[in-house]
Amino acid sequence: MIKTLSNNISFLRAMLYISALVILVVGALTYRSVTEVTKSSEMITHTYKVNVELEQILSYLKDAETGQRGYIITNDSVFLEPYLSARNRINNSFAELKVLTKNTPQLKSKLIDVNTLINKRLIAFKTSYRSLPKKDIEDPNFKSNFRNGKTLMDSIRDQIKGVIKLQNNLLNKRSDEYRSDLMATPLLLFSLLLCSLILIYLAYNSIYKNIKRLKIANEELEIFKESTNQSEIVSKHGSWTWDQNNDVFTFSDNLYRLLGEQPQSFEPTIQNFMQYVHPEDVEQLSQQVENMKKNVELPYIYYRVVHKNGNIKHLKAYGKSIINDEEETVLLGTTADITDEIISFRALEERNLELERNNQELSSFNYVASHDLQEPLRKIQTFLSRLEDEEAEKLSDRGTRYIDRIQNAATRMRLLIDDLLQFSRSNKADKVFEESNINLLLEAAKQDLAEVISAEDAVITSDAFPSMTVIPFQIQQLFVNLLGNAIKYKSEKRSPVINITHQVIEADNDPQITKPTKPFYHKITFTDNGIGFDNEYADQIFVLFSRLHNKDEYSGTGIGLSICKKIIENHKGHIIAKGKPSIGATFIIYLPID
């Protein structure tokens, strides 16, 4: 959105520049057009004035000629008045023409010629009427002078007509230029104004679209601002900025709330902020602020603030510098209230201490279970054995049964203590993973169960295992428990047959693996042909002390499979049980591959 608005602003700026240029061009052309039209008008007026003055001169000469003829015919001096005044009038007209033709050398030269002929004609007028004998128009000298005057008059008339014709040609040319200017100028002005209107429309349309975008952007910003405020309130953090060039801070509303104040209740300065900092943290925080101003960066810092009501809050702050569009460096920071985290951390520390005490007590219990409990149990079994050997004949049948029951109870108690010790060892934190030969661990488990395997005539088959990174003694214990469990719950109709398989699988391709931690796993499957179980108890059999059968039917404490699950959890793997009553059980183990 911001990039689009920036591009539109550049477009508008270009449109304004072009529109201003077009307006200047229109103004210049208008001025030029008006100037040309004015000049053409002045030239036309000038031409008309020249022609009028020439026509006036010719008229004066005609009047003089008419007066002369009247005088000749009547011999009345009244008719000489036009002739006598013609000289002054003609001089006045030539004076006007001299002004009009000062910038036209060619016309000025022709007028000089005309003026010379006029002077000659006026002299001829004078000579003609003075040479006239009294009422004798047939006098040869008179006729000669009169004809000479006619010739001069014709020359003058021809010269003036030539000048007038030249002026008329010039007038026509200027009239054509004038009409051309009058026609071209409006068309050009209209075209330029049309272009200006188009540019103004484009600019207006762009401005209108920008206003709509800005309105949408403002609405989005308002929503974002409100959501940010709410987010700051919910997440208990506030934001702030520092303008390095002007050394000006701005605080968000929730930053004030973190200090226990109302939004914008004081001027956002470091000095005002420091008033809320815990006295023990002021010096350290001041030094960190100075480093922030020097480096324009603020790594994570921790300090406390004290509200006016005395509440102490733990805060965490962080800042990172950016450069804005005006090439100014601004530090953007965030401050979070981590009081709840501190309280939770301290509670966790207390729980860890309590857990450590419990572990120590558990270790003490293990010692008691492995030494203090087993010692009296051994004595009970020893004295029972002596009693059977030395006093058996003296005991009644009921006494013998009591002794047998005591012996069975002591045996079960020993098994329970041994299983508890094994389960306790599977929970110990000192688990050392080693690159191990799983085939050797399986063989060691078989050796541990060699007597029972032989007694039950059990058949065990297995695939070859690759080396794995495991806790060796726990994996061996796992194999012992699973093999012992399969043999214990054998079918009365057939000898135990246990098949162990291995394969490497991809976690994504096996739906049994939930929330995999590694992409590949070792899949080890134990399958037996024992009594099996109903699948609805598949999860229950891994619960500590859980038994699906009566203790009189099958010996055991219900801890073996719990130990198996704990071992697999220690390896961050999975164990799944499946069964079919009277057919057999299957245990599937998934161990992650690093």
Image (cartoon, grey):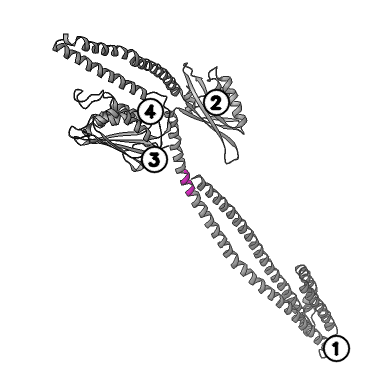
Q: Residues within 10 Å of mark 1 (few under 14, many from 20)?
A: some
Residue 83 location in percent, x, y?
79, 77
Residue 524 location in percent, x, y?
33, 37
Amino acid type, residue under disc 2 in the picture:
Glu
> For numbered disc 1, what is the local secondary structure?
helix
Q: Which mark is residue 267?
A: 2
Query: Are the residues at dot 3 and dot 1 in contact (C-beta closer than 8 Å)?
Result: no
* 222 left or right, relative to 584: right
Mark 3 or mark 2: which comes first in sequence?
2
Which residue is under mark 4?
473
Residue depth check, mark 2 versus mark 1: number of the one nearer the observer: 2
Mark 4 or mark 2: which comes first in sequence?
2
Tell me which corner region of the image, top left, top right, bottom left or bottom right, holds residue 131: bottom right
Magenta includes 209?
yes
Q: Quadrant of the C terminus?
A: top left
C-alpha gap between disc 2 and disc 1:
122 Å
C-alpha gap between disc 4 and disc 3:
23 Å
Query: Are the residues at dot 2 and dot 1 in contact (C-beta closer than 8 Å)?
Result: no
Which residue is under mark 3?
520
Tell me which corner region of the image, top left, top right, bottom left or bottom right, holds residue 380: top left
Residue 66 visible here:
no
Tell me which residue sits at (25%, 10%) in the image.
Answer: 383
Mark 3 or mark 1: which comes first in sequence?
1
Where 256 sits versus 510, above or below?
A: above
C-alpha gap between disc 3 and disc 2:
59 Å
Residue 498 visible here:
yes
Amino acid type, residue under disc 4 in the picture:
Phe
Query: Are the residues at dot 4 and dot 2 in contact (C-beta closer than 8 Å)?
Result: no
Residue depth check, mark 1 versus mark 4: number of the one nearer the observer: 4
Amino acid type, residue under disc 1 in the picture:
Asn
Q: Which residues are magenta?
A: 208-214
